[in-house]
Amino acid sequence: MSAQDDLRVQDGASDRDGLIHPEIAKPADESARSQDGRRLDHAEATTKPLSAEPQAARAREPQPRGAKIRGDRPIDQAEAAERFLAAPLHQKAHDERLWDLRKKRDTAAFGIPEWEELRELASQIKAHTLSRLDEYLEQFEAQAKANGVHVHWAADGAAHNRIVHGILKDHGARSLIKSKSMLTEECGFRHYMATTGIEVIETDLGERIQQLDNEEPSHVVVPAVHKTRFDVAAVFAKTMGTDPENDDARYLAESQRMHTRPLILEADAGLTGCNFAIAETGTVVTCTNEGNADLSGNVPKLLIHSIGIEKLIPRIEHLGVFLRLLARSALGSPITQYTSHFRKPRPGTEMHMVLVDNGRSERLGMEEFWTSLKCIRCGACMNTCPVYRRSGGLSYGATYSGPIGLIIDPTFNKRKYSTLPFSSTMNGSCTNVCPVKINIHEQIFAWRKVLAEEHQIPLLKQGMMKAAGQVLSRPAAYRAAIGAADSALRALPRFAVYNPLNTWGKGREMPDVPRQSFHAWYKQNRMGKKNDMGKKDALR
Amino acid sequence: MRIGLFVPCYVDAFEPEVGIATLELLERFGLDVEYPFDQTCCGQPMTNTGCHAEAAATEALFVRNFTGFDYVVTPSGSCAHQVREHLTAIPQTEEVKAVRERTFELVEFLHDILKVEAFPWAKFPHKVAYHSNCNALRGIHHAKPSELNKPAYSKPLDLLAKVPGVEVVKLARPDECCGFGGTFSVFEPAVSAKMGYDKVADQAQAGADYVVSADSSCLMHQKGCADRVGVPLKFIHIARILNGAAA
């Protein structure tokens, strides 16, 4: 019999609809219910409705911005997170929205009895593919060429940008519509294109919001999740002339659609990212909910696919494994609204595929970190991460935020992202939700070791640890440090970490100091009184 | 059966009653419990910060102190996890490996090794929220984590079910991290504290009077957060309940 059967476990959570911030719940929102009145508990558009805050309160709380970027200097994630926390309306909505996605993911995952087997299978398919990546890449290239596709290889982000720019220039393209692609973010593609005079138009709604606000995506699946509707209304008012006071989601989405649709229809070229690249057929598969990859891929006569080389899977039969996992992990929906296969150019059009390395080959050679290449960018680790939900994705100051970002970002720039692996409690929830079973929290742990060994952590921190190690390895010094004979301890982890700033007391009360330590109690009450224990210690 | 009692540094300094309860509880089962007097720490503060070299001497001391016992038992899932999974800064001799393999957290020791059927001296007529330390939950597998589609089990709740009067409340986020995270609590204090506030709010809203855990570190952090924001919860280590603490 399980503990749950034995104990009367009370459901105290039901009356608050599963929220830990019930004050922001919006009790009746018809868009969250189906026609028969049932709550819609999956699909991207129906995250848990959160109340529209009073106008005055919103006006007083501008959107917190992300980490300050100062060249290669280490990102201060804690500082940016603190600013995010200082905007409680944003923070609470962010936390509840993403936790809602996590719960939807649980519901969807638990609806499949073989879920854990699927994860294992997906993990193994990726491990196999990565172990023979060179062969599969060559197979993919040959097949794509046979399909009439132009294939390009880019060693890094700069090469990718040059290649894509070159293709556009050759065709005299003046505008490019694109769907969301973390790879192009990684390459700094939009910033690069801004210098070329060719207009880039993002077609994913969230990504378009971020583009218009000149901000990076804060999440790999829901790039504007850190913004409230009011923030979006302000951005659209400024850039498209909509009513700044109207933050109705339908109004905003429709306005964006009316504004962007003509640009899409007139675009000279289209670009998509890639969710899966199938080696045996040379196919690029994209998964979207808005159908925008299809617009980007089918409207213009010139089409470019940017593909990270880790996106390969061997055969079409493997795709089903990943499709069953991807949308369920990301949003709790069984599948994305659109799953599109791009294989060969339609008559009268031209298709290019750019295979991008940008550090992936090097990562493949890192014994402790290569499995991070299995990532299918579902964002489940971000949704479940308690630190991410309270910090906002922009606090990481990197293309990839949240748990997966902590283990990928340092491979791009060890110094700049040296602090990120410390922005975690290593609680391990990320590892458990990962659909391809990347041991994320163990890699965070491993990165800390690498960074400490290479002196990429602050001297202060390493100095504290050295001091702590010296004290904790010498019983007499340790006893002296924790207040030898029960003298009062005033600064909690001080004895363990020697933190001169005593940040414990900033957000928490200090613990009560007991009359005596266990050690002193034992000495007083048990030493010499219990058979040979006292004798043994007296000899030491 | 000779047991080495490991009392983690923060229990030693801040919650001696948890060490005492653990000692007395193990003795109630007729075990020969020794407390090596020169013990300090398992090395976790350094290791978790990436500073493995800085942890080596502390790890060596730990192994010296705890060599030769049938089992090493500690009232901390986090420290047991450190010893079993991460005590690797020193050469892995047979002696080191033996200490690591024999180190158990109290709940798993009672549940898996002693297979305790009853705690006749204990009763605790209160509504409690159980808090799983993340290392206890996902590192040494105290219970099925909420993320996995696997059969449910919970060693700490199995033990609490044997204590008359205990009523466990259901949280909105049953195993969300409370934000302690070891040195995370001092290096990233704002996020750490906010996670703590949210955790104690969830526990209070679920109707708990007490928060029970197998780890004093999480409890200490949560108590500090609850006291700061004025949430009237009480915090107690599971060792004390199992040893018959009245409340």
Image (cartoon, grey):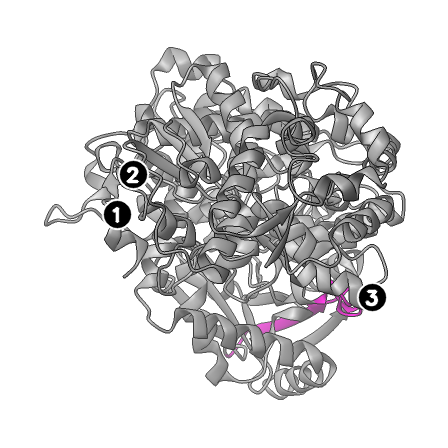
Task: Please tell me if label 3 and label 1 are on a single chain.
Answer: no
Disc 2 crowd, CA 10 A, few/some/many (<14, 14-19, 20+)? many
Disc 3 crowd, CA 10 A, few/some/many (<14, 14-19, 20+)? few
Write down the region rendered in magenta. Answer: A347-370
Mark 2 lies on a secondary structure that is: loop
Q: Going by the image, does A449 lie left or right of A227?
A: right
Residue tagged by mark 2?
Answer: B166
Residue nearer the viewer, A482 or A125: A482
Q: Going by the image, does A31 lie left or right of A219?
A: left
| In magenta segment, residue A427 | no
Residue tagged by mark 3?
Answer: B93
Q: CA distance from mark 3 to mark 1?
A: 44 Å
Q: Quadrant of residue A502?
A: top right
- Residue B78 in percent (x, y) is at 60, 46
Residue tagged by mark 1?
Answer: A7
Q: CA distance from mark 2 to mark 3?
A: 44 Å
Q: Please, which chain is the residue tagged with disc 1 on? A: A
Q: CA distance from mark 1 to mark 2?
A: 8 Å
Q: Please, which chain is the residue tagged with disc 3 on? A: B
Q: Give the amino acid at mark 1.
A: Leu
Q: Quadrant of residue A71?
A: top right
Q: Residue at x 82, y 52 (%)?
A: A450
Please say if the residues under marks 3 and 1 sit with CB atoms less than 8 Å apart. no
| In magenta segment, residue A369 | yes
Residue nearer the viewer, B142 or A262: B142
Task: Please tell me if label 2 and label 3 are on a single chain.
Answer: yes
Q: Give the amino acid at mark 3.
A: Thr
